[in-house]
Image (cartoon, grey):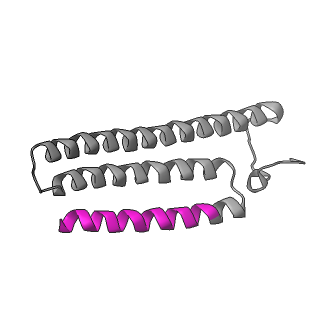
Amino acid sequence: MPGNEYPMTQDIDCWPVTGDICSMLEELVRDGTRFLGIIVDAAAALIIAHAVVRAMVNYARIIVKHETDKLEVRLDLGKSLALALEFLLAADILRTAVAPNWDDIGKLAAIAALRTLLNYFLERELKHA
């Protein structure tokens, strides 16, 4: 496909689908995957927002009651952040799946490594708390 902006998909054979139908199917999959990536990103943002609001409310209760144990608030927030990291990694994988060039794959690998490390240390802290 001359001028294909997705170089790794140039050699895809759409048999038994031919011509314009093949291009339409590729575009449909690409658009659907991009849309799904946006939805997963939004879900991660909602998880983080909900967790932060919940942590602020719980922390305010602790302050009002003059309690000193904030561990439960930290653990709850940490669990939600770990979940949000998984969602963000999934969204990155979706975006890279539809526009795979070596630069995007390299970025995904770096992002995945960083998010996996963050998640590992977060999970480790949650287990030892």
In the image, residue 88 sits, relative to residue 53, either above or below, namely below
Camera-nearest residue between 101 and 22: 101
Camera-nearest residue between 94 and 21: 94
Highlighted magenta segment, given as a residue range: 107-129
Residue 12 in the image, given as x and y percentages of width and height: 75, 49
x 26%, y 67%: residue: 125
Left or right relative to 59: residue 47: right
Residue 70 in the image, given as x and y percentages of width and height: 17, 55
Camera-nearest residue between 75 and 70: 70
Camera-nearest residue between 90 and 41: 41
In the image, residue 42 sits, relative to residue 120, either above or below, namely above
In the image, residue 9 sits, relative to residue 112, either above or below, namely above
What is the quadrant of residue 29 in the picture?
top right
Left or right relative to 19: residue 85: left
x 50%, y 42%: residue: 41
x 60%, y 39%: residue: 33
Residue 82 in the image, given as x and y percentages of width and height: 35, 55
